[in-house]
Image (cartoon, rainbow, N blue to C red):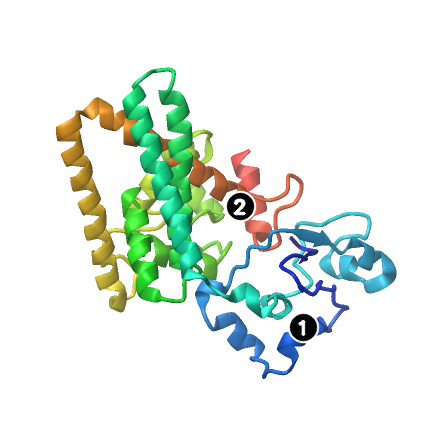
Amino acid sequence: MARLALSDCRGLTPLRARSRGSAIALPSPPHLAAGPRRPAAAAIHRDWALRVAAPTRLASVFEEDKRGLGGAEEAGGSSAGFNPGAPPPFGLAEIRAAIPKHCWVKDPWRSMSYVLRDVLVVLGLAAAAARADSWLVWPLYWAAQGTMFWALFVLGHDCGHGSFSSNPKLNSVVGHILHSSILVPYNGWRISHRTHHQNHGHVEKDESWHPLPQRLYNSLDNMTKKLRFSMPFPMLAFPLYLFARSPGKEGSHFNPNSDLFQPNEKKDVLTSTASWLAMIGVLAGLTFVMGPLKILKLYAIPYVIFVMWLDFVTYLHHHGHEDKVPWYRGKVNIMVNQICN
């Protein structure tokens, strides 16, 4: 990511590496040139939900480096190869300025169509598996339904980021329904996830998947070290994280008095915890009616598959190149890798 540029979403202006001590010069798209420009600081902080972009394609700028732009030398690497440990030669303000205005438009109808589609697939898979009730079908169902639970989580995640729609109430209602259905406290997780993005890779302030200081690592008991750092256990850590957070941190995503939350967020946390408990009640009722074995096959095992998807994808997002760690992880993560290997 250190020296890559966004290159999709029609009309996107490629980013150019900046020379030492200078900013990036980006030509304004024609449809944005006439309007007033928002200051860079305001562009970054206007809405935390928009601070992370998800480009569909990345284009290398190595050729520009070879032409003498000097990006590789400033980044701490050489023009001979990509250095994932170097900071990118551009900032969030430059990225935002290069993205055409229409790419920021949120279509709630389109978003809701994705929700309807995924919910219908989830219900259809469950009905088909229950009807077949065959051990030839169940493993296929578990893999497919666990993946669909992950799809529901992603839609709820977009609600939490505000990218689902521009209507906060719609985001909250849909996010609660989707996340509660897969036993995720919507607001509790949304707030901690916001904290994570605002302090990404920070050894103390990051909320999850952050490098541990050696002092803290050494203080962990052997069981915690095993469950946190030895595969496949970290792939099942999400439920434990919701209840007890990461090692070295106290509190819970369900407790409105946790230091995760501000006083004015307690009501939101209580609402999400109540929704989560309501889903537990629904599952308990279904277990009473259908039997524990059927609920185990229809819901519990797909839930475990979903947790594995969530932790696996998050792990890949937060662990870098095999030779060099991402620039934002720094020397602390190098130390952690050394003491854990």
Q: For mark 2, does the 10 Å Cα neighbourhood hold few (<14), some (14 to 19), or many (20 or more) residues?
A: few
Report the quarter where the C terminus lies.
top right
The picture places residue 159, in percent across and down from the top left corner, at 38, 57
Residue under pointer 1 = 29
The residues bearing labels 1 and 2 have C-alpha atoms spaced at a distance of: 31 Å
Which of 228/7 is in front? Answer: 7
Disc 1 residue type (three-letter):
Pro
The picture places residue 115, in percent across and down from the top left corner, at 38, 49
Disc 2 residue type (three-letter):
His
In front of the other: label 1 or label 2? 1
Residue at 82% x, 64% y is 69
- The reply to whether callout 1 and callout 2 are in contact (CB within 8 Å) is no
The picture places residue 88, in percent across and down from the top left corner, at 66, 59
Q: Please tell me the numbered disc located at residue 317.
A: 2
SS under mark 2: helix
SS under mark 1: loop
In the rendered view, tell whether residue 56 sits above or below residue 147: below
Q: Is residue 156 visible?
A: yes
- The quadrant where residue 10 appears: bottom right
User: Is 242 positioned to the left or the right of 230 in the image?
Assistant: left
User: Is 227 positioned to the left or the right of 51 in the image?
Assistant: left
The picture places residue 100, in percent across and down from the top left corner, at 61, 67
User: Is 85 positioned to the left or the right of 128 in the image?
Assistant: right
In the rendered view, tell whether residue 168 sits above or below residue 128: below
Q: Closer to the N terminus: mark 1 or mark 2? A: 1
The residue at the far right in this view is 67
Which of 235/142 is in front? Answer: 142
Residue at 19% x, 52% y is 274
Residue at 77% x, 68% y is 19
Q: For mark 1, does the 10 Å Cα neighbourhood hold few (<14), some (14 to 19), or many (20 or more) residues?
A: some
Q: Please tell me the numbered disc located at residue 138.
A: none
